[in-house]
């Protein structure tokens, strides 16, 4: 059902029946460490290069998800998935073996929001009983893709974020699950002209503010409609900008805002500076902390808003700005049959 | 409605109400030249670099589509779009100004199939009245991305294809239109281990064969159910492999097969070798030749199968194979109210 300009409310209940998350060593030493299904010490994940490592990360996550949900590949109709690498090669090689029809998505670090939106719509419409939505990132493959070779040992400004090594996957299903996808708000490209790829929070905060305001306007509610409004990876710098931008629009969310990028590395800011990032960051936070808080009844309804910075090394070197995009998901407490 | 393992038949009629295509000079000198809405002589499209040129190409196409369909940006609920460049930068900067919620897609040269599939599902489900599906490619931005700088003047083997400079966009609508999207068959990643990026036809043909066979199996029909089976950009080399692979599965389609990559540059093979490619190639052929044949009643039902080769320069340089993917759309003759 269309609700306002950007929001779709699903006709039928679509549940997140199962979640799986695999993370790297640094992530597992952070506050979410106890939640991950698998934590892997070896940053190469036993493979030969960073891209293969990220593919292996995806594979481990899907394998874990299928075990947890007691399904096999033949039970899954579609996968909606993406990563940060050019031409989605982590996804291509990571998902190849499953022989499941694939919709490849690119929304930068907002990809998990895009994947859950389209996956839930697909289940809602009856085009599938069951689909997987997935997003991954890897610190080293992302640094190689977007910034400097690790061997270069470049200095990182305080505004920079640390790409999380992690993959989160959810099984969307008609049946039951700890979380219910109630609807989604789809983001526009928002460009405030920021050109600093070492300050992704500033690039993405305007898109996050735009999305949150659009969601509240579309559904005709105030921020307290949600127990928590959760952005993807704005970090400390982006969070401040988000609050300022929303204040201009008359919304105060600071008493109910959480940022996955802040949560994931809280306490280790010496290395990770402004926080975590990467599309794996919000994906693994969804599959751990967010799921636990909703399942336990601490939160009954949240707005989950992964945020992405749209750039490539080519566009950066050509001096283009870095626009942002955000995709919002309305999550509610689900049902668990026994 | 789920139909077999990979096919979805839409519940309601979803029409392609309007099509727009913008192409480059070489494309406009080929057999489809008369059909394009706009042909542009300047390969830079008046911009400063190849990526900006491709963004401008997308912009011109959307502008044209809106004029032809007599709609404006506020009438469009979502855009489903993608291109071949890393992190979809042609799409990011091309679609920024429209302020329309965006789902960014990557399916290599199969992207138009993916975009129409998801766009039509979205309209079918009632989540939108009207969406745009779009894909673009540009010869020079693609060569720069995947192969050699143009200035290098590299030699091209006979199996190589020529990335088409073009953008095709369709307006998907509940109302009416010359073509009806009846359903779609979603592709899997198919890897026959081919590693030659100068022979994309061989990389993609197995995925095309797999998709066509899956579609026919799912709907329980023989190839003559379709007036034409149209692949994206297999070219002459890939077409031969497709016929062989389908023959092994008991299907003969040579009397009703067309490949957009062959059509678009027919007669100019000295330059373009095995044919055209790029996600713009099938997109602009859909919006011209295919639309005209269906509107005129020459064809009543076709299977349109854009095909993609999943690789990046990183994966290529790491010696990985180039898997393929294909996304199929069942198109039927629509209705045009007067």
Image (spheres, coloured by chain):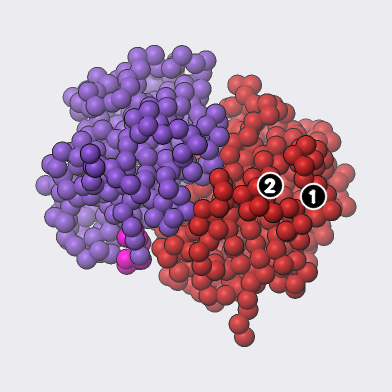
Chain colours: A red, B purple
Report the span colored magenta: B2-10
Q: Residue at x 42, y 44 (%)?
A: B130
Q: In the displayed structure, would residue B130 be above or below residue B161?
A: below
Q: Residue at x 39, y 14 (%)?
A: B42
Residue B244 among magenta residues:
no
Task: Where is residue A6? Give x, y as percent.
Answer: 56, 46
User: Splitting the image into 4 quarters, where does residue B24 fall?
Assistant: top left
Disc 2, SS: helix
Disc 1, SS: loop
Q: In the displayed structure, would residue B12 be above or below residue A107?
A: below
**A103 vs B35, nearest the viewer:** B35
Q: Residue at x 52, y 15 (%)?
A: B48
Q: In the displayed structure, would residue B49 be above or below residue A84?
A: above
User: Splitting the image into 4 quarters, where does residue A325 fall?
Assistant: top right
**B64 vs B42, nearest the viewer:** B64
Q: In the displayed structure, would residue B186 be above or below residue A174?
A: above
Asked if disc 2 and disc 1 are in contact, CB closer than 8 Å, the reply is yes
**Chain holding disc 1:** A
In the rendered image, which residue does mark 2 sit on?
Answer: A212
Among all residues in the image, which is located at the extreme bottom? A338
Q: CA distance from mark 2 to mark 1?
A: 10 Å
**Mark carried by residue A253:** 1
Q: Residue at x 15, y 38 (%)?
A: B296
**Do the residues marked 2 and 1 share a common chain?**
yes
* Residue A108 left/right relative to A41: left
Task: Where is residue A27? Give x, y as percent.
Answer: 76, 56
């Amino acid at each position: 059902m269309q609700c306002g300009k950007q929001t779709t409310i699903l006709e039928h209940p679509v549940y997140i029946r199962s979640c799986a998350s695999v993370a790297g060593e640094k992530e597992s030493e952070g506050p979410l460490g106890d939640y991950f299904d698998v934590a892997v010490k070896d940053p190469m994940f036993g493979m030969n290069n960073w891209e293969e490592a990220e593919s292996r990360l995806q594979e481990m996550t899907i394998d874990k998800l299928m075990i947890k949900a007691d399904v096999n590949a033949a039970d899954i109709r579609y996968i909606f998935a993406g990563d940060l690498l050019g031409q989605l090669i982590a996804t291509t090689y990571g998902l190849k073996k499953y022989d499941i029809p694939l919709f490849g998505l690119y929304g930068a670090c907002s990809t998990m929001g895009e994947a859950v939106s389209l996956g839930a719509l697909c289940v809602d419409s009856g085009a599938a009983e069951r689909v997987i939505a997935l997003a991954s990132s890897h610190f080293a493959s992302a640094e190689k893709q977007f910034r400097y070779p690790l061997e270069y040992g470049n200095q990182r400004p305080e505004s920079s974020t640390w790409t999380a090594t992690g993959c989160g996957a959810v099984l969307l299903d008609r049946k039951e699950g700890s979380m219910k996808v109630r609807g989604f708000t789809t983001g526009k490209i928002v460009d405030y002209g920021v050109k600093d790829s070492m300050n992704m929070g500033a690039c993405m905060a305007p898109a996050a503010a735009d999305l949150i305001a659009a969601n509240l306007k579309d559904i005709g509610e105030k921020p307290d409609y949600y127990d928590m409004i959760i952005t993807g990876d704005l970090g400390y710098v982006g969070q401040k900008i988000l609050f300022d931008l929303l204040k201009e629009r008359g919304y105060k969310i600071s008493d109910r805002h959480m940022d996955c990028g802040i949560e994931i590395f809280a306490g280790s800011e010496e290395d990770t500076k402004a926080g975590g990032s990467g599309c794996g960051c919000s994906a693994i936070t969804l599959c751990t902390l967010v799921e636990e808080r909703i399942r336990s009844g601490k939160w009954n309804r949240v707005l989950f808003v992964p945020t992405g910075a749209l750039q490539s090394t080519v566009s950066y070197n050509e001096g283009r700005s870095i626009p942002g995009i955000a995709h919002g998901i309305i999550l509610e407490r689900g049902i668990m049959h026994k």
